[in-house]
């Protein structure tokens, strides 16, 4: 597809790519990008983001829940705001565009308006959410939940693998755990998040941009399996109560249940075994399940089946099993007016608008409880994400920024 971007659009995209490269240097693990919520790397990334906001004339700050927030006033002080942003935490050994692209693109839009001395009828609020991935602590989306007025109070009592409570980590980061649950955003007219697709559809169709229509609902479960640890050589096979083999059978049963339905997916992405010795029968296993579907009723039915299979396998193998829900997000339908506005912005660039759902969860689905919300997708190579191979082109970066800028300029408070 021939580019319909202006030289100014391409230059803005190149500047954004350079900033994304610089932002990737904020990592907790040298040689790979790992920036967990409230970590030292997250603190340094937040400080850099605040500094860049300052260069655009914005007074940014860390809010009580650990988000970085800033406001660009409209023609009239106190006008309702269009909120833009995404998250700046990452998974372990991450790519540099997931989340970061949307947060820095939001800042790039405001920087361009500020440099031109341009004020709009509405204000623009920027947010760089701190906790979307849910890697360090078991709950996730705590930053957007705080702004949407749906914060989980008990989230603060969670501890990471080193025994650090989220409450203490948030306080050390510069947040305020005593106020995190009471910072619901006011006078926000709309929320829009720009994000890499994390899937292969746009690339397969030769399109740089997509407009998100809906986001899959998701449930995360934490499963504990308790058997009896014993000597690997002295315990006959028929007398074992092996927690790991029971968990393995459960994993296969979960996979089989997900394969029965189109658009239903289930993943076991973490499994821990105790005592973890070669010559000891595992006595305890802890694993996490992630179940997603575009229809909440189908997801609930699948979860009931999964729980029943876990219980049946545990009983048959003589082990105990506990299942705890750690995350629940209903499927979310993007606001039709936002979808229409993004569609117009994409069309203005000479790009064929492509409407598609998101299989991954995002802060948008939480912010949708506060105000109308929607998303713009940018093509990524091979649909690869949560991986250092994550890749976008300078041209596609520029397309996403140009479309977002057009949407922001055309946005009207209704």
Image (cartoon, rainbow, N blue to C red):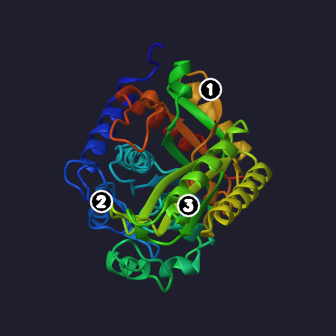
Outermost residue to the top: 2
Q: Describe residue 204's horizontal placement relative to residue 354 as left or right.
A: left
Outermost residue to the bottom: 178
Please provide percent x and percent y for residue 234. 40, 66
Q: Secondary structure at mark 1?
A: loop
Q: Which numbered mark, 3 or 2, is in the foreground of this view?
A: 3
Residue 371 placement: quadrant: bottom right
Q: Secondary structure at mark 3?
A: helix
Residue 98 in the image: above or below residue 70: above
- Mark 2–mark 1 Cα distance, whole angstroms, equals 34 Å
- Mark 1–mark 3 Cα distance, whole angstroms, equals 61 Å
User: Is residue 414 shown to the viewer in this render?
Assistant: yes
Q: Residue at x 68, y 54 (%)?
A: 372
Sequence-first tag of 2 and 1: 2
- Mark 3–mark 2 Cα distance, whole angstroms, equals 54 Å
Please provide percent x and percent y for residue 142. 52, 68
Sequence-first tag of 3 and 2: 2
Q: What residue sits right under mark 1 in the picture?
A: 353
Q: Describe residue 370's horizontal placement relative to residue 391 as left or right.
A: right
Q: Describe residue 105's horizontal placement relative to residue 121 as left or right.
A: left
Sequence-first tag of 1 and 3: 3
Residue 238: numbered disc: 3
Q: Nearer the viewer, residue 343 or 113?
A: 343
Q: Residues within 10 Å of mark 3 (few under 14, many from 20)?
A: few
Q: Nearer the viewer, residue 68 or 294?
A: 294
Q: What residue sits right under mark 2 in the picture?
A: 45
Please provide percent x and percent y for residue 111. 37, 48
Q: Residue at x 27, y 39 (%)?
A: 18
Q: Residues within 10 Å of mark 2 (few under 14, many from 20)?
A: many
Q: Secondary structure at mark 2?
A: helix
Residue 190 placement: quadrant: bottom right
Q: Nearer the viewer, residue 228 or 2?
A: 228
């Amino acid at each position: 597809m021939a580019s319909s971007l202006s030289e100014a659009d391409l230059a803005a995209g190149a500047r954004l790519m350079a900033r994304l490269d610089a932002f990737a240097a904020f990592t907790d693990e040298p040689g790979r990008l790992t920036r967990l919520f409230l970590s030292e790397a997250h603190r340094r990334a937040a400080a850099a983001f605040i500094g860049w906001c300052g260069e655009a004339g914005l007074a940014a700050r860390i809010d009580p829940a650990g988000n970085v927030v800033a406001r660009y006033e409209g023609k009239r002080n106190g006008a309702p705001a269009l909120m833009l942003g995404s998250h700046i935490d990452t998974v372990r050994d991450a790519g540099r565009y997931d989340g970061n692209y949307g947060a820095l693109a939001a800042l790039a839009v405001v920087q361009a308006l500020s440099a031109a001395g341009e004020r709009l009828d509405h204000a623009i609020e920027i947010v760089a959410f701190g906790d979307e991935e849910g890697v360090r602590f078991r709950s996730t989306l705590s930053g957007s939940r705080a702004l949407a007025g749906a914060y989980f109070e008990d989230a603060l009592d969670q501890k990471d693998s080193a025994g650090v409570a989220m409450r203490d980590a948030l306080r050390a980061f510069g947040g305020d755990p005593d106020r995190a649950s009471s910072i619901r955003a006011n006078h926000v007219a709309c929320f829009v998040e720009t994000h890499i697709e994390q899937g292969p559809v746009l690339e397969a169709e030769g399109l740089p941009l997509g407009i998100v229509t809906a986001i899959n609902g998701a449930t995360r479960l934490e499963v504990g399996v308790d058997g009896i640890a014993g000597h690997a050589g002295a315990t006959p096979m028929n007398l074992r109560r092996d927690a790991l083999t029971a968990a393995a059978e459960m994993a296969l049963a979960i996979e089989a249940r997900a394969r029965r339905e189109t658009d239903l997916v289930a993943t076991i992405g973490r499994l821990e075994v105790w005592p973890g010795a070669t010559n000891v029968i595992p006595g305890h296993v802890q694993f996490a399940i992630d179940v997603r579907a575009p229809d909440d009723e189908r997801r609930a039915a699948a979860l009931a089946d999964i729980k029943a299979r876990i219980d049946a396998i545990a009983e048959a193998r003589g082990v105990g099993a506990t299942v705890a829900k750690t995350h629940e997000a209903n499927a979310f339908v993007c606001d039709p007016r936002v979808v229409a506005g993004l569609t117009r912005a994409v069309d203005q660039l000479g790009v064929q608008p492509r409407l598609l759902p998101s299989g991954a969860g995002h802060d948008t689905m939480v912010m949708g409880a506060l105000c109308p919300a929607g998303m713009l997708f940018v093509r990524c190579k091979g649909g690869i994400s949560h991986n250092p191979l994550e890749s976008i082109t300078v041209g596609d970066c520029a397309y996403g920024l140009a479309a977002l800028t057009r949407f922001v300029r055309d946005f009207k408070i209704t």
